[in-house]
Amino acid sequence: MTESVKPLAGTSLSERLPRRRLAGVINGQYAGLVGAIVVVSVAMTQLSPFFLRTQNLLNIGSAISFTGIVASITTAVLISGGLDLSIAAVMALSGTIVATSLENGVPVAVAIALALLASVAVGAVNGSLISYVGINAFVITVGTQFAVRGLAFRVTDGRVIRVSNDTIRYLGQGRVAGIPVPLLIMLVAFAIVWWLLHATVWGRHWYAIGGTPGGAMARLAGIPVRFRQLQLYVLSALAAGVGGIVVAGYTTVGDANSLTGLELSILAGVILGGTALTGGRGNVVGTMLGVLLIGIISNGIQLLNLGVSTQYLFLGSALLLAVVYDHLRTNGVARA
């Protein structure tokens, strides 16, 4: 039986997937997203003389980087049929640990290590309870979201702590050949996740697990479903930890109350990019386009001084549209 199952999740799939994704781009798989980005960009060019300025475009790149770093691995989490709503809280915790550690004279390398270790610990708790105990991912990650946010407030004692360390600031504000460092980190994150999804056994397993409810067929194929799920939640928290450090460098503060609701923006970008909430389908190319579209519109709202209320209305509407679109697309695929 093992012999007959292997071709479904074997190396031939890893060889075909990258070509399929590239063919999808060429054949117009992302034409809607690309078209929306072009239309919004043209409209913003007409509405604001500042939109196409180099500095503003670089600002957009920096702004979407925090979302993109985490959205890259969130794509894989959703592909596997999972869900992680604790990511924004983990980002806040990571930033506060770095800020507090530096304030207390801890070397910057140790401060970063502590922040990432704390993030990985949260991911291990999420993954263990979801994959090995079998508790619903929504319930667990909402619970850890509040617990982690509370821990961040304990770490800072409710204060906003200033970050003056040059290394951390460079991660959030530095430039390499004129390109923002956060943007480069985001691109590296997307490249790593693309490689994991399409060139490693891990990625093939994640797709297989999300392909059927509860990963039933993946279990029959001998895939270590529980371990692969645990793996993903640890990677998700690790990416959030990295994102939190970058945010601390960009804003120059460690704030336990920061990034509230960012997980919804991340999910909206991932789902708009074509990743199914039900699992088994998605890729980071679409996610990158989805994150970019949301970033451009958010930047436009700021340039036009439309206020915070408009920002929330847009993000809420984007998430609703993304969920409805995913539902219609999934049902269409099922009927076909």
Image: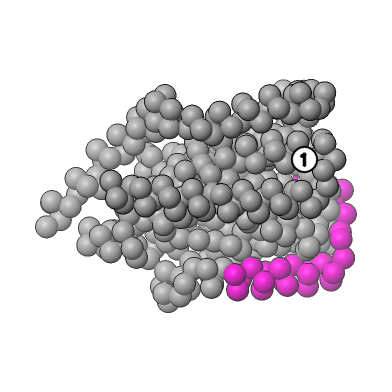
SS category of the residue bearing label 1? helix
Q: In terms of depth relative to the viewer, which is nearer, 111 or 156?
A: 156
Q: In terms of depth relative to the viewer, which is nearer, 306 or 9?
A: 306
- Seen in the picture, residue 20 relative to 279 is either above or below; the reply is above
**Image coords of residue 98 (percent x, y):** 76, 57
Q: Amino acid at mark 1?
A: Ile
Taking the image as shown, residue 332 lies to the left or right of residue 117, namely left
**Image coords of residue 60 (percent x, y):** 72, 34
- Seen in the picture, residue 41 relative to 322 is either above or below; the reply is above
**Residue 202 seen in this snapshot:** no
Which residue in the structure is indicated by mark 1? 301
- Seen in the picture, residue 193 relative to 244 is either above or below; the reply is above
Q: Quadrant of residue 29?
A: top left
- Name the image colouring: one colour
Question: Residue at 37% across / 52% down in the picture?
Answer: 331
Q: Which residues are magenta?
A: 142-168
Question: Residue at 84% across / 71% down in the picture?
Answer: 157
- Location of the N terminus (image quadrant): bottom left
**Image coords of residue 221 (percent x, y):** 22, 58
**Image coords of residue 120 (percent x, y):** 58, 61
Whether residue 256 is in magenta: the answer is: no
Q: Quadrant of residue 260?
A: bottom right
**Residue 40 seen in this snapshot:** yes
